[in-house]
Image (cartoon, helix red, strand yellow):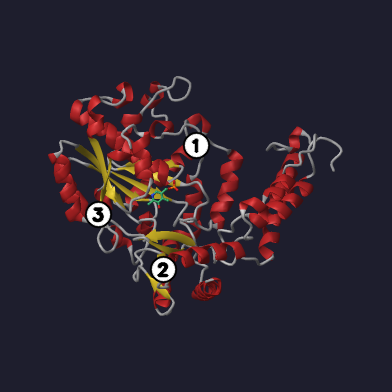
Amino acid sequence: MQSTKPTVDSLFMNQSQQGMEAFQTALHTSIDSLLTEWKKGKGPYSGILPGKLADSVESLFQFQPSGEAIESVFQDVKDHLLPHLVNVSHPKCLAHLHCPPLIPALAAEVIVSSFNQSMDSFDQSGIASLVEERILKWLCEKFSYGDMADGTFTSGGTQSNYMGLLLARDSFCENTWQWNVQKKGLPREAHRMRILCSKNAHFTVKKSASQLGLGEDAVVLVETDEHHRMNITDLKQKLADLQADQLLPFAIVATCGTTDFGSIDPVSDIYDVAKKYGIWIHADAAYGGALVLSHAYRDKLAGIELADSITVDFHKQFYQPISCGAFLLKDKRHFGLIDYHADYLNPKEDEIEGILHLVNKSVQTTRRFDALKLLLSLRLIGEEGFGDIIDHTIRLANDVASLIDQHDDLEVINQKPEINAVVFRFIDDKRANEINKSIHRTLFQTGSAVVAKTVVNGHTCLKFTLLNPRTTINHIEEILSDIVDIGIAHIQSGRVLN
Ligand SMILES: *Cc1c(COP(=O)(O)O)cnc(C)c1O
């Protein structure tokens, strides 16, 4: 244990020899502990459930009155923390839209956190504000979004979807009743306002509706077609029904990459239907947005440029460490609907002088310089390199679907995956749901693979989300073999019990 308290110079970034050495030692120790964990060559999770982790947590909470040497702290990190984290970079970690982070982005994180710029005002960010603006311009161009487009970085898809619906709501109230929601709150007619999205849209559409004072019941669910995309005939019907009931549809959320199947709603068709009603279209491309960099599959996003706003997540198929996302707006003037000026932060006179305060476009105030991670990743890999990775994972998903299709004990639900999610299940006449649940649990508890579980038409299914380009068909064969073994063992033990 350390006998003297650490000096201030060894605790904060500074130009002294002691400060620099302390920073390097801290980073090295941290990286070393990570590599030690990797070298053990384990599965993606220890398999330990929450009830058995309490002792490990307590071991981490041994505070010494005057602190400890870094080696001693990281010994506990190595012993009690790292073994029980879910290893998202492991090729058999395939559950959620939860990506392995790119190494260049991890290096960028060191700079982002060390300089700790805050994106709300220019005097807390300097060039960082301009870099964020520039990468948003690049992004708007990638989405063919036109000269009036702009955007902001967000904490992720939840916040981006919230912003889309917030601006849609306020813009509708302004246009319909010359009503300023920002100043006066919701108008009396607000209970008639409706949002449409497909049955497979993300739950944050409903969550946003509730937070926006419209209530979850304001969300009208449109039926989907056989590919789990929004059914346009039903959309027309629902709009006609709403009109007949004197209700006010003001926004349609088109999902570009649904969570289960990666399905992409036909944005052009939705636009053709919605245009005459003046309805705001928000494209939730949290998952599918990465296809803008694809060589072979960019066309799947055709029409997304017609949407009034777009959600895109970088902490999914752009391989950025959490958090990193963006909200794009086709007509940047709509950002005025959430504009606030604080004398201490972003006074109006600065705007006249052309000083950039990005807080004007965000629902957050203090905000991270996440744009740097994406910039350095793009520099290091190149747009083409990104496209190669994305295309590779989509091709892998198609190969995996064919492989599952050949298994007698398994059924693949989406034979041609739209992006890189493959949904399937173990088949059994009597107890399929129970068996699939058991397979999911057993894989997690043995730590051999982390896969997802979902429900499709009442059937419990398993899901691979194949984001990791290091996952190979061999890894998948091994997991499938484990799945079949567990399924068969479950049937046999059931026979014994019965
Ligand atoms: C992930 C996801 C979200 C939520 O985004 P977060 O980044 O988790 O906040 C919303 N919509 C879709 C389609 C998603 O895939």
Type of amino acid under label 1: Arg
The relative height of residue 440 versus residue 107 in the rendered view (above or below) is below
Tag on residue 424? 2
Whole-number angstrom distance, CA of label 1 to CA of label 3: 38 Å
The label nearer to you, 1 versus 2, is 2
Q: Position of residue 436 (x, y in %)?
A: 47, 66
Q: Is residue 46 above or below residue 15?
A: below
Mark 2 and mark 3 lie on one chain; the one further toward the N terminus is 3
Per the rendering, the mark at residue 367 is 1
* SS for callout 3: loop
Q: Position of residue 430 (x, y in %)?
A: 42, 70
The image quarter containing residue 15 is top right
Residue 425's place in the image compared with 250, above or below, is: below
Q: Earlier in the sequence, mark 1 or mark 3?
A: 3
Whether residues under marks 1 and 2 lie with C-beta atoms below 8 angstroms apart, the answer is no
Q: Is residue 266 left or right of residue 33?
A: left
Q: CA distance from mark 2 to mark 3?
A: 22 Å
Q: Nearer the viewer, residue 473 or 28?
A: 473
Q: Does residue 445 appear to the left or right of 141 in the view shown?
A: right
Dot in front, 1 or 3: 3
Structural distance between the alpha carbons of marks 1 and 2: 40 Å
Q: What residue do we see at 16% from left, 50% from top?
A: 236
Three-letter amino acid code of the residue under disc 2? Phe
**In the rendered structure, which amino acid carries the disc numbered 3?**
Glu
Instruction: Return the x and y of residue 17 as percentages of the image width and height.
Output: 76, 41
How many C-alpha atoms fall within 10 Å of the one at disc 2: few (<14), some, or many (≥20)? Answer: many
